[in-house]
Image: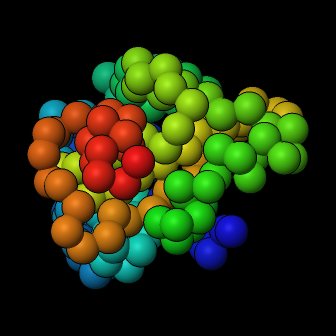
Amino acid sequence: MIKGLYETHLPVSDLQRSIAFYESLGLELAVQSDDVAFLWIEKRSSWLGLWAKDDFRTNREPSTAPSNGRHIAFRVDFDDLRAAVGWLAERGIAVDAFGGVDVREPLMRPHQQNASVYFYDPDGNHLELMCSLPEGAPTEPARLLPLSEGWPELT
């Protein structure tokens, strides 16, 4: 099921400075908002999330980041993601709701062209199975939603 690393996250004290730094290393800016930016490491395969913190010396994270600041996403194929809830259940792992969307199916971000299933390891580290959406996937709306709502033709 797991093919590689899709994303990892870092807290940063100055988002614009950090974007410029990582772009100078060859990463490409993919998505940016006021307090977060995602840069492609390998386009449509893996990226780095940079999260601006109001006070870098505290452990405060933006509301959409994991509360403990520890998060990693494993890259999977789209077909595997569609089966991920069952795959995790077979291993005794519960799927976690995320971003205020409390469903037990993959979640998609049409505007970012990716989809995810969230869960935790035994130490409370926030984990995710994530994939790029296939060609032809919807590109709207610009929010997190259940796969069955965002792409009902699949269900």
Question: What residue do we see at 53% from left, 55% from top?
Answer: 82
* Residue drawn at point x = 37 percent, y = 40 percent: 148
Q: Tell me, what colour scheme is on the image?
A: rainbow
Using the image as rendered, state which of residue 95 and residue 63 is in the foreground: 95
Q: Quadrant of residue 131?
A: bottom left
Residue at horizontal 14%, vertical 39%?
A: 141
Visible residue check, residue 39: yes
Q: How many marks?
A: 0
In the picture, measured across the screen, residue 28 lies left or right of residue 125, that is: left
x then y, percent, for residue 66: 53, 30
Q: Tell me, yes or no, if residue 57 can be seen here.
A: no
Instruction: Tell me the quadrant of the picture where the N terminus can be found.
Output: bottom right
Q: Nearer the viewer, residue 50 or 77?
A: 77
Percent of width and height locating residue 122: 85, 35
Which quadrant of the figure has residue 42? Answer: bottom left
Q: Nearer the viewer, residue 33 or 140?
A: 140
Residues 87 and 74: in front is 87
Residue drawn at x 37%, y 65% is: 132
Q: Is residue 7 above or below residue 28?
A: above
Image: 61 above or below 127: above
Is residue 23 positioned above or below 32 on the image? Answer: below
